[in-house]
Amino acid sequence: MLSDLEANVIAAVILVLQFDNFYQAFVVMSAIVFSIAGVLFGLIVTGRPFGVVMGGIVVNNNIVLIDTYNALKKTGMSPLEAALRMGAQRLRPVVLTSVTTALGLMPMVIGVKLNFFTREIVYGAPSTQWWTELSSAIAGGLVIATVLTLIVTPAMLMLGEKKARRALQVPRIPSVAMA
């Protein structure tokens, strides 16, 4: 069985191989930080305790965004235009996926138990306590991570392009004027 660290290292290696770029793999893995921030925010809002089980990872949105960015750059777009179009093209799918998942978790977040056999709805049933904490963490992490991903990922990609351009520039040696 792999530990979390080993699994993350393997995922990072696969991302480096997929994107052929260390920086873009780092940007994808930064979604882990976004997710943890969202998990903590979701638990604070709902007043639930934090547990080790609740550290979810949201990297799919970053993978989709960076893949679109690379595809647009290959068509000859400038990095800025590719980043802007990436955000415009992928805004709706990313938001819809996250919102529908978060809304689907809402019955668990508020602690509703549906019993289809007896046709009853119970609010705050004992069986919903563990699921309430887990779903609060997932929904909070997903929503916050999605917002941060849509804002921070394009900014990080542009920052990476700027650093890459600086690294490729040859330093100029000042010429000495002869008198």
Image (spheres, grey):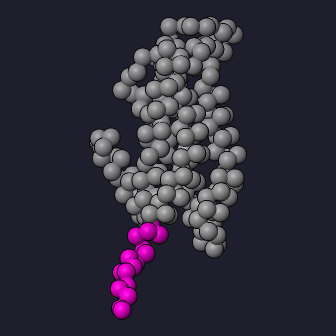
Residue at left 43%, top 56%? Answer: 25
Camera-nearest residue between 111 and 148? 148
For the residue pair 178 and 174, the one nearer the viewer reads as 178
| Nearer to us in this view, 49 or 150 | 150
Q: Left or right? Give the position of 2 relative to 37.
A: left
Residue at figure coordinates x 47%, y 51% from the top left: 28
Please state the extent of the stretch shown in magenta in the rendering: 164-179
Does residue 85 appear left or right of residue 31 in this picture?
Answer: right
Picture layout, residue 20 above or below residue 63: below
Q: Closer to the camera, 41 or 155?
A: 155
Spot occupied by residue 34 in the image (x, y as percentages of width and height): 48, 38
Q: Quadrant of the N terminus?
A: top left
Q: Residue furthest bottom?
A: 179
On whether residue 170 falls in the magenta region, the answer is yes
Find residue 176 and report its horizontal and vertical position in percent.
35, 86
Picture layout, residue 17 above or below residue 129: below
Majority secondary structure in the magenta region: loop
Where does the image place residue 63, in percent across and percent down from the top left? 53, 53
Q: Residue at x 61, y 58 (%)?
A: 83
